[in-house]
Amino acid sequence: MEIAFGPVPSRRLGHSLGINNIPPKHCSYSCIYCQVGPTPAQEITPRVFYPPQEIRRQVEAHLHAVRARGEAVDYLTFVPDGEPTLDSQLGEAIDSLSDLGLPIAVISNATLIGREDVRAVLNRADWVSLKVDSVDAGIWQQINRPHPDLRLADILGGIRTFARTYTGKLVSETMLLAGLNDSEKAIQSLGHFLSEAGIHLAYLAIPHRPPAVSGVHGPNEHGVTRAYQILAAQGVEVELLTGYEGEDFASSGDFQRDILAITAVHPLRESAVRTLAEKAGSDMGIVANLVQSGELRRVEHAGELFLIRTFGRLTNP
Ligand code: SF4
């Protein structure tokens, strides 16, 4: 079994060397958008999968191999084809990697975070992402199709408790699905929970790979812009993970390149784009061309015009 893979480019984590510490597909959810397909038998009790020494051996060997090819690695990331905290030895695995000199990330669906032992394990990681697709129990059931013994209130309570004491970087990730969790009311409730829990960076994603249930898809640019603005108005820092990994956002002096990179992450008011154009000694003709070619889209929200990077053809049927 190949446990280590990548590194894959990630806007959140740079060059992220992935660690698949769970065989496919052991999960507590069976999300309708899951790219690994439906979960055959959901489980919620952590148990032994691969020995931590084997995880360490494979990660170290893979790290040496990719570095020998001159590739950079910025993070070691537990991102399996299932839920990483179902591994009862995840804490030992994290500890076994600590002397490799790289920060460690865990991307979790948060279902077991109501457990004190799971919070203690996640505490050992430098960066943790927790899935929060909805704080409405009915929508949560529809989207995540949880194990019958899971309770949304326990998960949300566990996230609040974890956020109070965790000293690493904590972020949330929400998969936006058209007609399910993208209404104004659903996003307001989500934003209220995130800001009250103290999660200050929320990532919004849309499905980009074939989902477990056909027909499931993300909202269009208008829906994503609306969700972004609602969360931002509640004091939550938001970034979009809508498929384009972009380049970094340092100004390159190339207005077109910068505007495409920024609008992939943050929808920008047209007035702000105009100001940027002036600063760069450029003009809005470039923006008009990008809109015409379909790379940018103009979206109206609350009486204001925004520009957002077009997601690409997999977003909507
Ligand atoms: S939590 Fe992740 S692995 Fe589990 S069903 Fe949902 S998307 Fe798939």
Image (cartoon, grey):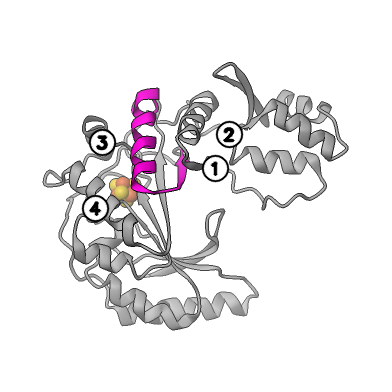
Q: Earlier in the sequence, mark 1 or mark 4?
A: 4
Q: Residues within 10 Å of mark 2 (few under 14, many from 20)?
A: few
Q: Earlier in the sequence, mark 2 or mark 4?
A: 4
Mark 4: which secondary structure? helix
Q: Earlier in the sequence, mark 1 or mark 2?
A: 1
> Can you identify the residue that label 4 sits on?
158
> Can you identify the residue that label 2 sits on?
312
Q: Quadrant of residue 187?
A: top left
The label shown at residue 140 is 3
Q: Quadrant of residue 168?
A: bottom left
* Viewer-nearest residue: 229 or 107: 229
Q: Residue furthest left?
A: 149
Mark 2: which secondary structure? loop
Mark 3: which secondary structure? helix
- Please name the amino acid that badge 1 sits on: Gly
Q: Position of residue 70 (x, y in %)?
A: 65, 75
Q: Position of residue 213 (x, y in %)?
A: 32, 34
Q: Is residue 95 above or below residue 237?
A: below
- Please name the amino acid that badge 4 sits on: Gly
Circle 1/circle 2 CB separation < 8 Å: yes
Q: Earlier in the sequence, mark 3 or mark 1?
A: 3
State how far apart marks 2 and 4 are (Cα). Answer: 36 Å
- Please name the amino acid that badge 2 sits on: Gly
Q: Does any portion of residue 55 appear in the rendered image?
A: yes
Q: Residue at x 84, y 40 (%)?
A: 280
Magenta range is 180-205
